[in-house]
Image: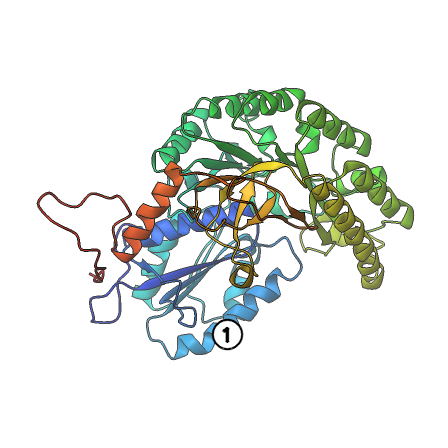
Amino acid sequence: MSEQQPISSPQSEGLPRTYEVRTFGCQMNVHDSERLSGLLEDAGLARKPEDLTEEVADVVVFNTCAVRENADNKLYGNLGILKGVKESRPGMQIAVGGCLAQKDRDTILKKAPWVDVVFGTHNIGSLPALLNRSQHNKKAELEILESLEVFPSTLPTRRESVYAGWVSISVGCNNTCTFCIVPSLRGKERDRRPGEILAEIQALVDDGAIEVTLLGQNVNSYGVEFGDRLAFGKLLRACGEIEGLERVRFTSPHPAAFTDDVIEAMAETSNVMPQLHMPLQSGSDRVLKQMRRSYRSKKFLGILDKVRERIPHAAITTDIIVGFPGETEEDFQATLDVVEASRFASAFTFQYSQRPGTPAATMDEQLPKAVVQERYERLTALQDRIAKEENAKQLGRTVEVMVTEHAGRKAETTHRLSGRSQDQRLVHFSVPEGAQTPRPGDLVTLPITEVAAFHLVSDPTAEQYQLRRSRAGDAWDRSQADSCGVPAPGASSEPGRTNLGMPTLKVRS
């Protein structure tokens, strides 16, 4: 069956089947899910409406992660819940892809034989064809490739946001960290050509986006495949030449390959944001060696010093693993010392978990859970204190915030909107009485009036509040009009027709 052939519906209603993609894992998985959504819509499916939270779609796709210990439990728990739903819904299909699928392969079908399709990280473009084949042959389809079939950037995409977008610059990883299974699941690093990347960014900007985040397992090693070790810095500078692109971010770099030319490019390119995610993993040189992380704590701290010298207000975040095999109290104290010296704005902290297939899983001296838990709690308490102290320095500062679609958990009671400052800090803010309310994608400039460990607050006066309506906000308006049939404010009607503002209902075809 052709990959372009629509995925047929077993019902005779003539309505398109609905789909939903459930994503576990990192930003790469989130971006892959945008591709999966684009593929399914290209094949004739319709996204399940967000307001139908209790309803299960006709096609449910799990895009999985294999990094964390509970990844398996999370997937099989979800699959177990759907088993009964599938038995009562003839024609419903379930697909499992991503890193866990690449690792477990036919194990998924043995544990959950009601799954229809299992596909890997290298062939996400095959999903529509595999769903069709499974439906036609009335049996499960398993397809796992060992190398990349098609670079994901060439696939149809349904972006989760109209005002900001992910752009993958490479896939795979050439490092051999002993705790990480990603290289064996994503393969060796493959780099896209700069022209292709810049063309995708330009297309996003043309559609209204004003922010992009460059993605790669190790973004700053970009260019090694085609022989240019300075390529990443050049790419950042080229992003600075794109008119209308206001914010550029990237994740995640590797400290071992982080060079001065990248710092200079960050400092000298106006739309590269003053924010850096730099994974530490451990502050102990002995543990770093065991992890096969090819840098030491002195180099790591030196990078932070250089970044802050050139970009004084940069917010730096990190990843840290607690309880790596053989980690002593002295090793852990070294991590606490580096965290204290680094002054991270925030940190993603993880308790080490054994992942089958990684060298660390077979190492001696696996630590007791109680020891790891106690150290984890000490680390998070330290980082929470530092984060609040660093946020306290923002008090009274005036910041520019890009408004996001999703507000905070307490928005119904506080009536505050939310957004991200240039350094990526989360800001909850109120709109002064009588002032114009911003749209997602618009930018507001306001003072920070309150701080906490994980966010900032702004309750500005009318004089302190400045709103800049943006192309991204216009794009959000258009997307809302497209989704509900109501024209965006200011949109022109057809010649000779008067629009009375009455909503129209879209009819499924």
Q: Nearer the viewer, residue 354 or 457?
A: 457
Q: Which residue is mark 1?
A: 81
Q: Quadrant of the N terminus?
A: bottom left
Q: Residue at x 31, y 59 (%)?
A: 46
Q: Residues within 10 Å of mark 1 (few under 14, many from 20)?
A: few
Q: Nearer the viewer, residue 239 or 181?
A: 239
**Residue type at numbered disc 1:** Ile
Can residue 156 be seen here? The reply is no
| Residue 509 % position (x, y) | 20, 61
Give left or right: position of 26 versus 245.
right
Using the image, determine if residue 273 lies above or below residue 9.
Answer: above
| Residue 63 % position (x, y) | 49, 56
Q: Residue at x 57, y 53 (%)?
A: 25
The local secondary structure at tag 1 comes to: helix
To which quarter of the image does residue 495 belong?
Answer: top left
Q: Nearer the viewer, residue 206 or 142?
A: 206
Q: Residue at x 22, y 55 (%)?
A: 501
| Residue 128 % position (x, y) | 34, 55
Using the image, determine if residue 359 lies above or below residue 247.
Answer: below
